[in-house]
Amino acid sequence: MSTEHEPSAQERAAWDRVCAAATGMNHHRAKAALEEARRTAEDAADAGARAERDEWERITGALADHAGSYDPEADPFVQGRLTARSNRAQAAARGR
């Protein structure tokens, strides 16, 4: 049986911080931020630091073949994550 991993509040907050910080960055700036996040995650045992590193890796990868800057409004992964959060909140409000 497979158990679905529900992200912690700490992980969600880390993703949101990274998306906000990355907004407007080009690939080179995002890559520099990724290197800093990797150093931080090496020294940290918490899920938030690892989540930040993972999100910087994802964003840097998305920008690798993109000449422009990062925009979470145009990021399908972020938009899907927001939709999933909204759907979970609506289900909880209905008492499921």
Image: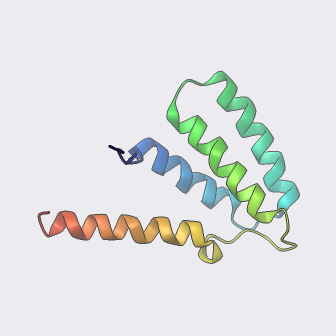
Residue 70, image x and y in percent? Answer: 73, 68
The tally of labels here is: 0
- Quarter of the picture containing the N terminus is top left
Residue 13, image x and y in percent? Answer: 48, 49
User: In this rendering, is residue 15 above or below 86?
Assistant: above
Q: Is residue 17 left or right of residue 68?
A: left
- Quarter of the picture containing the C terminus is bottom left
Residue 75, image x and y in percent? Answer: 63, 71
How are the colours assigned in the image?
rainbow
**Residue at far bottom of view:** 74
Q: Nearer the viewer, residue 13 or 8?
A: 8
User: In this rendering, is residue 92 above or below 53?
Assistant: below
Q: Residue at x 69, y 65 (%)?
A: 23
Q: Quadrant of residue 52?
A: top right
Q: Residue at x 82, y 50 (%)?
A: 31
Q: Is residue 38 left or right of residue 83?
A: right
Q: Residue at x 57, y 42 (%)?
A: 51
Q: Is residue 60 left or right of residue 43?
A: right
**Residue at far front of view:** 1
Residue 68, image x and y in percent? Answer: 83, 74
Q: Is residue 32 left or right of residue 9?
A: right
User: In this rendering, is residue 80 above or below 46?
Assistant: below
